[in-house]
Image (cartoon, rainbow, N blue to C red):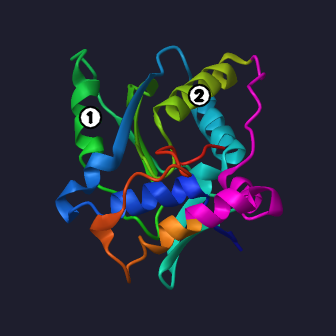
């Protein structure tokens, strides 16, 4: 059973921002990344990806609407949503076309994981991994952090930086007594952003930065 949790203020900001996009703009919330896999085995890549998913709740999180308010479901186990392709790679710019193709595909805001990838191999040897993440779960800094972890895990060093508190833990703290003054002002802001209010009246919230929170 997934663990259900409210969203942190940062997550909620990202949700409300993307929710106001026109349907044909949803891909604008996507962030791409390409990782060089040359010199690695398929087993090394698979093990490192599985470890990243295990370490970071954001990679195991789906969003759902509970009434008017979105909630997050953190799943205990998910399979990395990676498509595997084997083909002869001769064009050094091929990864750019793959990146453009993936980043143009919008994510469903509710019900699905908010990241995907394609691992391209040539004659069974991994060449590159093209990834796309929704801004609902990461920002650019988070993607660089993920890549650094991936490199550490595939190098055999095993040492990676602490993951830090997951977004649902941040959401719990933000609803505690220590956060009460900021919480009250943030909740006044968000009440004006619920579907019953005006979607277009929301200004940039000072209590939830554009980052989604990362873990």
Counting residues from the start of the chain, the first of labels 1 and 2 encountered is 1
**For the point 76% across and 16% down, which residue is it?**
157
Left or right placement of residue 174 versus residue 203 in this view:
right
**For the point 57% across and 61% down, which residue is it?**
186
The residue to which callout 1 is attached is: 98
Residue 80's tag is none
| Image vertical order of residue 179 relative to residue 163, above or below | below
| Image vertical order of residue 123 relative to residue 13, above or below | above
Residue 153 image offset from top left, x and y in percent: 68, 25
Work out whether residue 83 can be spotted.
no
Left or right placement of residue 67 versus residue 161 in this view:
left
Q: Which residues are magenta?
A: 157-186
Residue 145's tag is 2
Q: Residues within 10 Å of mark 2 (few under 14, many from 20)?
A: some
What whole-number distance in Å separates the C-alpha atoms at marks 1 and 2?
A: 22 Å
Work out whether residue 159 can be spotted.
yes
Nearer to me, 187 or 20: 187
**For the point 49% across and 65% down, which residue is it?**
189
Q: Secondary structure at mark 1?
A: helix
């Amino acid at each position: 059973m997934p663990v259900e949790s409210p969203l942190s203020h940062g997550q909620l900001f990202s949700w409300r921002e993307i929710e106001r996009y026109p349907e044909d703009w949803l891909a604008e919330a996507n962030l791409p990344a390409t990782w060089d896999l040359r010199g690695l085995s398929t087993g090394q890549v698979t093990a490192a990806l599985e470890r990243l998913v295990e370490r970071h709740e954001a990679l195991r999180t789906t969003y759902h609407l509970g009434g008017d308010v979105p909630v997050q479901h953190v799943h205990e186990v998910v399979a990395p949503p990676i498509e595997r392709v084997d083909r002869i790679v001769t064009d050094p710019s091929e990864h750019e076309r793959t990146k453009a193709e993936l980043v143009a595909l919008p994510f469903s805001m509710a019900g699905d994981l908010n990241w995907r990838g394609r691992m391209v191999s040539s004659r069974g040897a991994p060449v590159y991994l093209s990834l796309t993440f929704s801004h609902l779960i990461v920002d650019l800094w988070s993607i660089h952090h993920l890549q650094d972890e991936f490199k550490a895990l595939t190098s055999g060093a095993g040492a990676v930086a602490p993951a830090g508190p997951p977004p649902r833990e941040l959401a719990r703290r933000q609803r505690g007594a220590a956060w009460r003054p900021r919480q009250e002002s943030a909740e006044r802001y968000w009440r004006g952003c619920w579907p019953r209010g005006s979607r277009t009246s929301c200004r940039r919230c000072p209590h939830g930065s554009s980052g989604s929170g990362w873990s």
